[in-house]
Image (cartoon, helix red, strand yellow):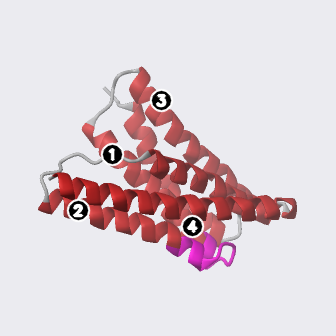
Amino acid sequence: MVNIPNLLTALRLVLAPVIAYDVCARKFSMAFTLFLVAALTDWLDGMLARKLRITTQIGAYFDPIADKVLMGAVFISLAASGIAPWWFIMVVLGRDIGILVAASALLKFTKVRELSPSKWGKLSTFVQMIAAPMLIAAEISPTMISAAAIAVRISVALTIWSAVHYAFQSIRLVRES
């Protein structure tokens, strides 16, 4: 049986480099449309997996990876194209790398075996998924520039806050184990 949620996650992984290419090639309408499709797959795969009760270990593993690949590719292409500031991308990717390193250390050096995303991490990713298409939309329509700038600022604040929150969670887990 074909697992539709996992196929949607795979589609998001396939779309990530296509969207990044379109941003770099300044095909902003196509990049914007494909990003919306990718964001829809993120919503649909989780909703379908829960509703149809077909959650899988591989889906739980690859869904956040697909999110990070999509956002990383899009943000790097936005910065490489001069659309987003590099410092913003460093904040976003720095947090993600920090989470990966901390999670790896927790799994290797403690008895912790299950790590869940925090509400702040989910909110941060959600706002990043709003900021990215807004930055692309600002290239299509300059009337979006102010809204995109606000989305970037909110995204930075939430990304930093979620990094601090994850750091405190990690410290708590180390103390408990």
Q: Do the residues labelled 3 and 2 touch (CB within 8 Å)?
A: no
Q: What stretch is highlighted in magenta?
A: 78-90
Residue named by callout 2: 104
Q: In which quarter of the image is the N terminus?
A: top left
Q: Of callouts 1 and 4, which one flags the residue occurring earlier in the amino acid sequence?
A: 4
At label 3, the amino acid type is Met
Q: Of callouts 2 and 4, which one flags the residue occurring earlier in the amino acid sequence?
A: 4
Residue named by callout 3: 47
Question: Circle 2: is it few (<14), some (14-19), or many (20+) Cα within 10 Å?
Answer: few
Label ID, residue 75: 4
Q: Of callouts 3 and 1, which one flags the residue occurring earlier in the amino acid sequence?
A: 3
Above-or-below relation of 59 to 121: above
Residue 157: quarter of image? bottom right
At label 1, the amino acid type is Ser
Q: Determine whether the residue tagged by mark 1 lies in a helix, strand or loop.
A: loop
Q: Position of residue 135 (x, y in %)?
A: 70, 63
What residue is shown at x 71% (from left), y 57% (from top)?
A: 134
Q: Determine whether the residue tagged by mark 4 lies in a helix, strand or loop.
A: helix
Instruction: Tell me: 14 left or right of 117.
Output: right
Residue 9: quarter of image? top left
| Viewer-nearest residue: 122 or 65 | 122
What residue is shown at x 41% (from left), y 34% (from top)?
A: 5
| Viewer-nearest residue: 91 or 30 | 91
Residue named by callout 1: 116
Q: Determine whether the residue tagged by mark 2 lies in a helix, strand or loop.
A: helix
Question: Circle 4: is it few (<14), some (14-19), or many (20+) Cα within 10 Å?
Answer: many
